[in-house]
Image (cartoon, rainbow, N blue to C red):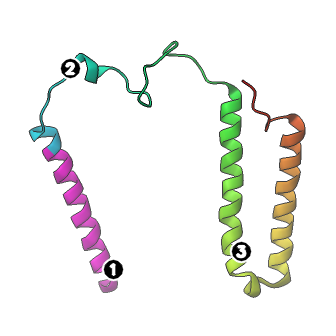
Amino acid sequence: MAPYLPLFLFLIVGAVLASALFGLSTFIGPKNPTPEKMIPYECGSETTGGRFVKPSVKFYLTAILFVVFDIEAVLIYPWAVEFKNLGWTGLATMGSFVLLLVVALLYVWKKGALEWEK
């Protein structure tokens, strides 16, 4: 437990410092709400359209596909680092994983999920 003491102290000091700075800015900081400051901020431009317009399902599908293929990259990196130690079993496992991802990508491509329409 002794080797972890500096880490715990670092985390405690960080948490106390972050809490103190947040609390000080909340209670001591200037409060001057104006109508201009109270409007919703949207990338530096005026908001247009309805407030409760639902985004297209294509947006969510693209986001999910990004997460899936991002996780693929995260899983391939440690495999590549340990490639020599894993042997043929590791190669076969990763080969089946990549094959499954290629099949999934072909399916998504065939269904037209990668086409972005306006």
Image coordinates of residue 21 in percent, x first then y, are: 18, 51
Question: For this view, does 91 lie left or right of residue 48?
Answer: right
Q: Earlier in the sequence, mark 2 or mark 1?
A: 1
Extreme residue toward the top, this view: 50
Q: Would you say the residues marked 2 and 1 are in contact, meaning their CB atoms lie under 8 Å apart?
A: no
Q: Which mark lies nearer to you, 1 or 3?
A: 3
Q: Which mark lies nearer to you, 2 or 3?
A: 2
Q: Which mark is residue 4?
A: 1
Q: Which mark is residue 25?
A: none
In the rendered structure, which segment of residues is drawn in magenta? 1-24
Q: CA distance from mark 2 to mark 1?
A: 48 Å
Q: Main secondary structure of the magenta part?
A: helix
Question: For this view, does 112 lie left or right of residue 26?
Answer: right
Identity of the amino acid at label 2? Answer: Thr
Secondary element at tag 1: helix
Secondary element at tag 3: helix
Q: Which mark is residue 79?
A: 3
